[in-house]
């Protein structure tokens, strides 16, 4: 490596060399920085894949109904679909079907698995305030089921809101946005450190 001599106004240079250890250290640091960048890119990529971080909010009115649309990966068109309530690991099925392109009814619930669009639709009727809470759209498969969190808010007073009563996972709620941002920041901090 050539290095300009200090204090010399002419273009005088001296040859300096770095030891192989210094070069290895620089190379290792560069690879480590490159790996960190790749981990960050992979993290953001995973967070953008539907089903990795998927949450929708639905608002309905007491006595009315809501329509919930849940997307799934096309490779799961033959799998059983379900809608349940409670903690994810222990939620109890409210409706479940392995029927394709047919409406299935169970009490206040109906489910239609549209395999051509790779979505299933759940209709939830005769809502009451007690129905507010967390639900899950899921697809049965070996291992961990892919799922979408559904946050249902049932209001009793029409003046509380003017939002529509249907949902789509492609439009995450603004109330879940802060938690997603916090999750992203936490993952990036863990990766960088």
Image (cartoon, rainbow, N blue to C red):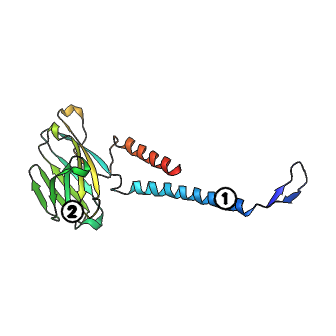
Question: Does 64 appear above or below 10?
Answer: above
Q: Quadrant of residue 113?
A: bottom left
Q: Secondary structure at mark 1?
A: helix
For disc 1, the marked residue is 25
Residue 62 rendering spot, x and y as whole percentages? 14, 38
Query: What is the crowding at mark 2: few (fewer than 14 residues within 10 Å), some, or many (at least 20)?
Result: some
The outermost residue toward the left is 107
Question: Does 126 appear above or below 142?
Answer: above
Q: CA distance from mark 2 to mark 1?
A: 56 Å
Residue 8 rendering spot, x and y as whole percentages? 90, 50
Who's the residue at 25% across and 51% down the image?
A: 89
As drawn, is 103 to the left or to the right of 176? left
As drawn, is 21 to the left or to the right of 79? right
Residue 53 rendering spot, x and y as whole percentages? 35, 52
Q: Report if the CB atoms under discs 2 and 1 are less than 8 Å apart.
A: no
Q: Quadrant of the N terminus?
A: bottom right
Who's the residue at 20% across and 40% down the image?
A: 132
For disc 2, the marked residue is 114
Who's the residue at 13% across and 51% down the image?
A: 109
Residue 13 rendering spot, x and y as whole percentages? 86, 58
């Amino acid at each position: 490596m050539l290095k300009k001599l200090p204090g010399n106004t002419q273009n005088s240079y001296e040859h300096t060399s770095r030891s192989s250890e210094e070069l290895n250290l620089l190379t290792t640091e560069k690879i480590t920085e490159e790996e960190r960048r790749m981990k960050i890119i992979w993290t953001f990529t995973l967070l953008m894949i539907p089903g990795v971080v998927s949450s929708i909010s639905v608002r309905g009115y007491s006595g009315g109904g809501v329509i919930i649309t849940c997307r799934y990966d096309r490779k799961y068109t033959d799998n059983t679909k379900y809608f349940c309530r409670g903690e994810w690991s222990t939620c109890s099925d409210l409706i479940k079907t392995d029927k394709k392109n047919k409406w299935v009814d169970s009490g206040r619930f109906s489910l239609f698995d549209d395999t051509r669009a790779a979505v299933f639709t759940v209709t939830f009727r005769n809502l009451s305030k007690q129905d507010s809470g967390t639900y899950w759209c899921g697809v049965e498969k070996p291992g961990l089921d892919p799922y979408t969190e559904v946050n249902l808010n049932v209001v009793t007073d029409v003046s509380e809101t003017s939002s529509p009563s249907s949902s789509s996972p492609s439009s995450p709620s603004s109330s879940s946005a802060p938690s997603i941002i916090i999750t992203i920041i936490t993952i990036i901090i863990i990766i960088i450190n």
